[in-house]
């Protein structure tokens, strides 16, 4: 397929995805009580209007119909629209768009850029609005990728197989070696293992494209930081990105620690407290010429208030003066942003923030010498195009054996293939270096995924290869803390069948028997001395997560209960995995996604407990390899043989719908 055919196909798929996004928004309805689907809050009143730390306006809303906010699904950093009146959120009632700064059980704080006269006695609604602007940016990026000019022309040809990657440098740049006669790289981080050192050396020598494949726990971010530092030492400006704000902030924190000058593009509400000071807003707030800008803004505000009392020629001259002041304000602010972003060694943002309508517009096309995309496999290919065209050299990092990006439209499933995965298939080992030493998992937890997905290349570092829960302070040694793997087999046990809520979706499943078994395991681990913060429960199904959470968090609110997808990138000392599916037909649904199981298994450091129906799972070839591995290497317990009174046959008289 030619580049142009591929880009046309991508455009078609993104239009399908846009339609699916629009359809989901249309489905957002709210009932008369104001409690609706996730993303909508109504029956709100204004509690306060204040200024944020960096000069934005913050509106605090609370519910006047409830003591606490009803279920809503809104999160910090979400884009929202504010409407006056009831829960219908009609366009004619639109007040302002904003960003969720913070949210609690009692209130929601939303920042807006332009002032608005909110009435304290009026009713308001807040609705999350979809990122359709992102799809517009991607469609524009697809067009740009078809018409590439400038420093990234050769790179774009490599990405589509029109040109081969340039051969690696035979000698390192002199700035990176101890002497002109040496070809040995001087590493900033002296603790890098051989695998990481080889990856850094490989990337530095690549002239256009390199991929760092980092399986779970192999120190991918540590390696990327070293790669960035080496390129900064060469005098290059670096653009570093990730699909998520959390991924970007992780890079910002690590680069800040080693003294690299960074600028973080993005709304402060979407950053962590530790990285806020590197945002454009924060840097401008502390900029040398900030006081002059503040004085101009105050003068504009004063003149604007006077307009209601000025008429005739004086009103005309006031408008003219306001225009001049606004022009001066914009020029000074633009100069500040330009100086800040051009002076940074590394500019960081999410993939979707690399467009030219923000601070990026102040940079020339050849400003960056290197673009680094972390967690590349978690973003769609075209979302990378906004940044790929900004430099002649590209480094992609991630693990295409973990979960891909979320795609709403079933017809657009081809978008699940990431740029990283495609270029590996295209160019193979010429562009890839894999990290092989992992620092997270006990060797027995690691070995299945290493064999099933990483060609047996992973090695457990000696510091973690044999570590167990019993080795932690204040944890006793018993049949659970003294083993790395535990399998609780529920097959053929009454009370352990899966259930489904037909009113929601076919993928919304739960298993009451497994949930009670999970509770028993949590109790045993806490009783053995683990702190609740060291334990996590994960499941592929959100309905099972809700059920388990309702059981556990009464006594153990600090035990984290999450979906597998929501826990990607995280780790805990002990992880309990409940797989839910249990039926006579051997149906396993989206458990058939190999990468989801890989993510689930590799979250645990010292102990992994798996609660499942082995007979159901063994109907699928890939899952069968996992079950067979667990049956061979784990401590295996039949569900009915667990301690009576703690777990076993599920006899509770509550209904699952009561819990959910």
Image: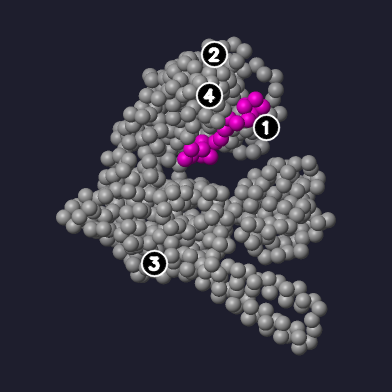
* Nearer the camera: disc 3 or disc 4: 4
SS label for mark 4: loop
Q: Is mark 2 on a helix, strand or loop?
A: loop
Q: Which residue is drawn at 26% across and 47% down?
A: 429
> Which comes sooner in the sequence, label 2 or label 3?
3
Front-most of residues 420 and 305: 305
Q: Quadrant of the C terminus?
A: top right
Q: Which residue has dot 3 on it?
A: 367
In the drawing, does residue 109 fall left or right of residue 631?
Answer: right
Residue at mark 2 to residue at mark 3: CA–CA distance: 63 Å
Is 414 in front, or is 284?
284
- Say if residue 371 shows up in the picture: yes
The numbered mark, 1 or 2, whose residue comes first in the sequence reads: 2
What numbered label is drawn on residue 660? 1
Q: Distance between the residues labelled 2 and 4?
A: 20 Å
- In the image, residue 612 sits, relative to residue 232, either above or below, namely above
Question: Dot 4 corresponds to which residue?
Answer: 530
From this view, report whether residue 199 is shown above or below residue 180: above
Q: Which residue is label 2 attached to?
A: 642
Q: Earlier in the sequence, mark 4 or mark 1?
A: 4
Q: In the rendered structure, which disc, 3 or 4, sits on the residue that comes first in sequence?
A: 3
């Amino acid at each position: 397929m030619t580049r142009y055919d591929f880009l046309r196909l991508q455009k078609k798929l993104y239009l399908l995805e846009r339609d699916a996004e629009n359809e989901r928004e249309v489905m957002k309805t709210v009932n008369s009580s104001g409690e609706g689907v996730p993303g909508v809050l109504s029956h709100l009143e204004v509690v306060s209007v204040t200024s944020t730390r960096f000069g934005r306006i913050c509106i605090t809303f609370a519910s006047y119909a409830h003591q606490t906010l009803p279920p809503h699904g809104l999160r910090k950093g979400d884009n929202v629209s504010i409407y006056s009146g009831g829960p219908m959120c009609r366009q004619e009632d639109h007040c302002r768009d904003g960003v969720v700064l913070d949210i609690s059980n009692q209130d929601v704080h939303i920042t807006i850029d332009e002032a608005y006269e909110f009435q304290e006695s009026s009713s308001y609604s807040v609705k999350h609005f979809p990122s359709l602007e992102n799809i517009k940016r991607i469609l524009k990026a697809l067009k740009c990728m078809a018409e590439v000019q400038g420093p990234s022309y050769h790179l774009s040809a490599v990405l589509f197989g029109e040109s081969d990657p340039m051969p690696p440098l035979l000698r390192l740049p002199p700035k990176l070696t101890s002497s002109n006669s040496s070809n040995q790289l001087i590493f900033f981080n002296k603790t890098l293992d051989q695998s990481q050192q080889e990856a850094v050396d490989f990337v530095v020598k690549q002239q256009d494209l390199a991929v760092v494949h980092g399986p779970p726990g192999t120190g991918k971010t540590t390696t990327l930081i070293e790669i960035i530092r080496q390129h900064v030492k060469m005098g290059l400006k670096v653009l570093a990105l990730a699909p998520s704000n959390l991924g970007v902030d992780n890079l910002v924190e690590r680069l800040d620690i080693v003294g690299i000058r960074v600028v973080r593009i993005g709304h402060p509400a979407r950053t962590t407290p530790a990285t806020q000071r590197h945002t454009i807003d924060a840097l401008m707030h502390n900029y040398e010429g900030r006081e002059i800008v503040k004085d101009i803004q105050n003068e504009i505000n004063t003149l604007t208030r006077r307009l209601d009392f000025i008429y005739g020629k004086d009103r005309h001259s006031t408008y003219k003066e306001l225009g001049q002041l606004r022009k001066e304000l914009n020029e000074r602010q633009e100069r500040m942003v330009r100086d800040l972003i051009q002076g940074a060694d590394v500019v960081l943002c999410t993939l979707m923030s690399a467009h030219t309508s923000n601070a990026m517009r102040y940079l020339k096309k050849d400003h960056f010498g290197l673009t680094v995309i972390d967690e590349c496999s978690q973003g769609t290919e075209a979302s990378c195009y906004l940044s790929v065209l900004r430099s002649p050299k590209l480094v992609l990092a991630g693990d295409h054996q973990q979960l891909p990006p979320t795609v709403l439209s079933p017809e657009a499933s081809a978008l699940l293939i990431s740029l990283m995965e495609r270029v590996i298939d295209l160019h193979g080992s010429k562009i890839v270096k894999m990290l092989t030493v992992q620092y997270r998992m006990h060797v027995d937890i690691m070995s299945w995924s290493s064999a099933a997905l990483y060609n047996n290349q992973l090695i457990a570092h000696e510091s973690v290869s044999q570590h167990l829960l019993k080795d932690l302070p204040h944890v006793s040694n018993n049949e659970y803390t003294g083993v790395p793997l535990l399998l609780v087999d529920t097959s053929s046990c009454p009370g352990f069948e899966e259930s489904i809520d037909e009113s929601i979706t076919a993928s919304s499943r739960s298993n009451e028997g497994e949930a009670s078994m999970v509770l028993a395991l949590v109790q045993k681990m806490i009783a053995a001395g683990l702190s609740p913060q060291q334990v996590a429960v994960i499941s592929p199904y959100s309905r099972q997560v809700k059920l388990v959470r309702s059981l556990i968090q009464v006594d153990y609110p600090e035990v984290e209960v999450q979906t597998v997808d929501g826990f990607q990138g995280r780790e805990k000392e002990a992880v309990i995995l409940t797989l839910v599916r249990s039926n006579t037909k051997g149906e396993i649904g989206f458990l058939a996604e190999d990468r989801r199981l890989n993510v689930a298994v590799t979250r645990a450091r010292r102990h992994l407990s798996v609660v499942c129906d082995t007979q159901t799972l063994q109907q699928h070839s890939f899952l069968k390899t996992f079950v067979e591995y667990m049956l061979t290497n784990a401590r295996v317990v039949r569900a009915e043989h667990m301690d009576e009174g703690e777990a076993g046959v599920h006899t509770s008289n509550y209904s699952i719908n009561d819990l959910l």
